[in-house]
Image (tube, rainbow, N blue to C red):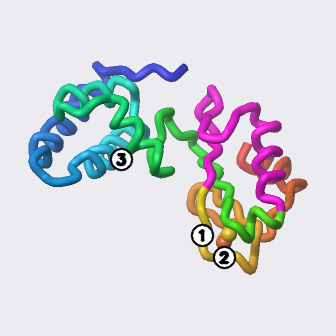
Amino acid sequence: MFLFDQEENREKIEEFIAFMDKNREMDGALLPVLQEAQNKFGYIPEEIVELISSHMQILTSTIYGVATFYSQFSFVPRGKYSISVCMGTACYVKGATDILEEFSKVLGIGLGETTPDRKFSIVETRCVGLCSDAPVVMINNQVYTHFKRADVDHILSILG
Ligand code: FES
């Protein structure tokens, strides 16, 4: 469980409230508000979901419903290295699920989770447009093509 320190984030929270105030009348304000939360805090803590709910009069279930629809939003802090496995059709056909499973097994976390030391997270992404070089894995901004299950150990030891 990751704890969100409200005291440490006081200034950011105030800026975030100001952002909500500025945008609350706008149609579809929830999406930019969620984007702002993700950018500002690096993820969307439960406390921030509750703050959005009370401040913008939106049910928390609606907020979670919208946020879970978009893979860019995360409810846990992302790790220093965000491992993003492409699950588009070409990558899927060429074994993306095996790669995902291997990362998961070696790191001991599931999809959408972060290791307790906050070093690695695993996420999935849709097609990144490199289908002829499938399967594709991205780690932060670094792209790895023709990725194999056997590459998992090697790549983690380099980052490690
Ligand atoms: S499906 Fe993975 S790059 Fe297109």
- Alpha carbon distance from label 2 to label 1: 6 Å
Indicate yes or no: mark 1 CB to ligand 1 under 8 Å.
yes
| Identity of the residue drawn at 51% across and 23% down | 2
Q: Which residue is mark 1?
A: 128
Instruction: Tell which residue pokes out farthest to the bottom in this image.
Output: 132
Of tags 3 and 1, the one toward the viewer is 1
Q: Residues within 10 Å of mark 1 (few under 14, many from 20)?
A: some
Asked if residue 27 is positioned above or below residue 54 in the image, the reply reads below
- At label 2, which amino acid type do we have? Leu
Residue at horizontal 34 percent and vertical 36 percent from the top: 62
Q: Marks 2 and 3: which is nearer the front?
A: 2
Q: Are marks 3 and 1 in contact (CB under 8 Å)?
A: no
Callout 3: 10 Å neighbours few (<14), some, many (20+)? few
Assess whether mark 3 and mark 2 are in contact (beta carbons under 8 angstroms): no
Check contact, mark 2 vs mark 1: CB within 8 A.
yes
Q: Quadrant of residue 85?
A: bottom right
Work out which quarter of the rendered image holds the C terminus and state it. Answer: top right
Number of the label disc, if any, that sits on residue 130: 2
Q: Secondary structure at mark 1?
A: loop
Label disc, if present, on residue 39 of the rendered structure? 3
**Quadrant of the image containing the N terminus:** top right
Q: Position of residue 126 (x, y in %)?
A: 59, 62
In the image, the segment drawn in magenta is: 95-124
Quarter of the rendered image showing ligand 1: bottom right
- Tell me the kind of residue under disc 3: Asn
Which quadrant holds residue 130?
bottom right
Q: Looking at the picture, which amino acid does disc 1 mark?
A: Val
Q: Secondary structure at mark 2?
A: loop
